[in-house]
Amino acid sequence: MADWSPANYLKFEDERTRPARDLLAQVPVARPRRVVDMGCGPGNSTELLVERFPEAEVVGLDNSPNMLAEARKRVPRARFAEADAGKWVPDAGTDVVFANAIYQWVPDHLEGLSRVAAGLPAGGVLAVQMPDNVAEPSHQLMRQVAAEGPWAEKLRDAARPPLPPVRTYYDALRPVSQRLDIWHAVYNHVLSGPEAIVEWVKGTGLRPFIDPLEPDEREDFLARYLALIAEAYPRTGDGKVLLRFPRLFIVAVK
């Protein structure tokens, strides 16, 4: 895929940051030495960590140069570096690893999460949030348009696989955790209309479908997708739409 766009991502900053706030509220560490924001994106979650842990060294990691450039401007108090979430392990002295909406993109992320949790010191915390929304109409319709269009072969592997069952995460992380908390939350984001839903997913989940397309193909794909989204998400009485968005949360204490 092309590099991530901070501008597209931040069009819905409040809605995207809310799960990070909810996850951070459950991190049971008072005075960590080092806090790592894995998949920091444009720094909106890193900003929360700096505010919560003013005495800690806060490090933001991402594999997107564009996102890191935006994060450095936004949170000069933190340190930022490029890293691969699929291979990274915490350095000694890291007490909190915070991962908001990153590991769903990482192949074999169960192994990676177990490795990160095992690398923490006693009392260290791995806090993870992942969208669990591939069964929602927003993502079902991506797959439908991809399969039915002239680009079907090109987009054959574009879809993100569903997250494993909660029990799978429990079995993977329990051996390296003294305390493990796993829960789901469903957000119902109030958006201006079906076009806003398309703009939302263009910044994240839709990218593997539209990035490989030529400009005219992309325009056709988005037009077909928007028409289906408008049917799947009828307007409310005041003309808005509700984007239902389930997310999985994990807090593992070493």
Image (tube, helix red, strand yellow):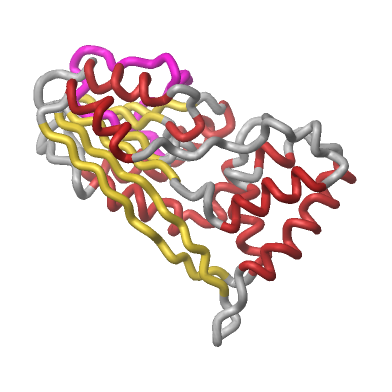
Magenta stretch contains residue 79: yes
Residue 11 included in the magenta stretch of the image: no
> Who's the residue at 73% across and 33% down the image?
156
Residue 192: percent from left, percent from top: 59, 72
Left or right? Give the position of 99 relative to 108: left
In which quadrant will I find the C terminus? top left
Name the residue: 58% across, 32% down: 66
Residue 191: image x %, image y %?
55, 69
Residue 85 percent across, percent down from the top left: 43, 22
Q: Relative to 91, is 149 above or below?
A: below
**Main SS, magenta residues:** loop
- The residue range painted magenta reads 75-97
Quarter of the rendering containing residue 30: top left
Q: Seen in the image, is 1 located left or right of residue 153?
A: left
In screen coordinates, is 31 left or right of 133? Answer: left
Residues 86 and 48: in front is 86
Q: Residue at x 53, y 34 (%)?
A: 67
Q: Nearer the viewer, residue 228 or 91?
A: 228
